């Protein structure tokens, strides 16, 4: 990846641990609230959903948009963030 946002760089700099979902690149404050109301308050829970979808970015993005109210841009950024994290740590 040629250009990384500072937020993506920070997220990829260490294991997920107990980071809140708002640490994931692409997750806005409003989307984080939507996710928390669905019980997805930690980044590792969102990562788990991504993994349950077999790291299929298109499926994950559709789920974020349809079920969680993400914009297309938010969905793309967050799926890319989780994909990059998997490439670094799995």
Image: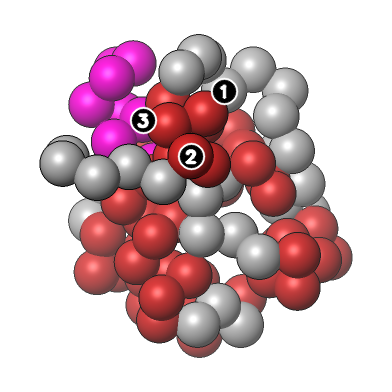
Whether tag 3 and tag 1 are in contact, CB under 8 A, the answer is yes
Mark 2 Cα-neighbour bin, 10 Å: few <14, some 14–19, many ≥20: few
What x and y, as percent, mark residue 9? 43, 31
Residue at 15% over, 41% down: 2
Mark 3 / mark 1, whichever is N-terminal? 1
Compute the Cα span from label 3 to label 2.
14 Å
- Please give the label number shown on residue 87: none
Disc 3, disc 2: CB below 8 Å?
A: no
Question: Is any part of residue 76 visible from this angle?
Answer: yes
Residue at the extreme left:
2
Q: Secondary structure of the magenta portion, mostly?
A: helix
Q: Secondary structure at mark 3?
A: helix
Q: CA distance from mark 1 to mark 2?
A: 16 Å
Numbered badge on residue 85: 3
Residue displayed at 43% across by 69% down: 75
Crowd band around label 1 with a 10 angstrom C-alpha radius: few (<14), some (14–19), many (20+): some
Image marks 1 and 2: residues in contact by CB distance under 8 Å: no
Magenta stretch encompasses residue 75: no
Distance between the alpha carbons at the discs numbered 3 and 1: 9 Å
Residue beneath disc 2: 6
Q: Is residue 84 left or right of residue 26?
A: left
User: Which mark is first along the chain, 2 or 1?
Assistant: 2
Q: Earlier in the sequence, mark 3 or mark 2?
A: 2
Give neighbour class at mark 3: few <14, some 14-19, many 20+ (Cα, 10 Å). many
Q: Secondary structure at mark 1?
A: loop
The mark closer to the camera, 3 or 2, is 2
Q: Which mark is residue 16?
A: 1
């Amino acid at each position: 990846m040629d250009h990384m946002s500072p937020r993506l760089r920070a997220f990829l700099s260490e294991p997920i641990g107990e980071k809140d979902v708002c640490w994931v690149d692409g997750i806005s404050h409003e989307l984080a609230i939507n996710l928390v109301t669905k019980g997805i308050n930690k980044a590792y829970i969102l990562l788990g959903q991504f993994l349950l979808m077999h790291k299929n970015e298109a499926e994950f993005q559709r789920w974020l948009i349809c079920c969680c109210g993400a914009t297309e841009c938010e969905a793309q950024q967050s799926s890319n963030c989780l994909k990059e994290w998997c490439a670094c740590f799995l």
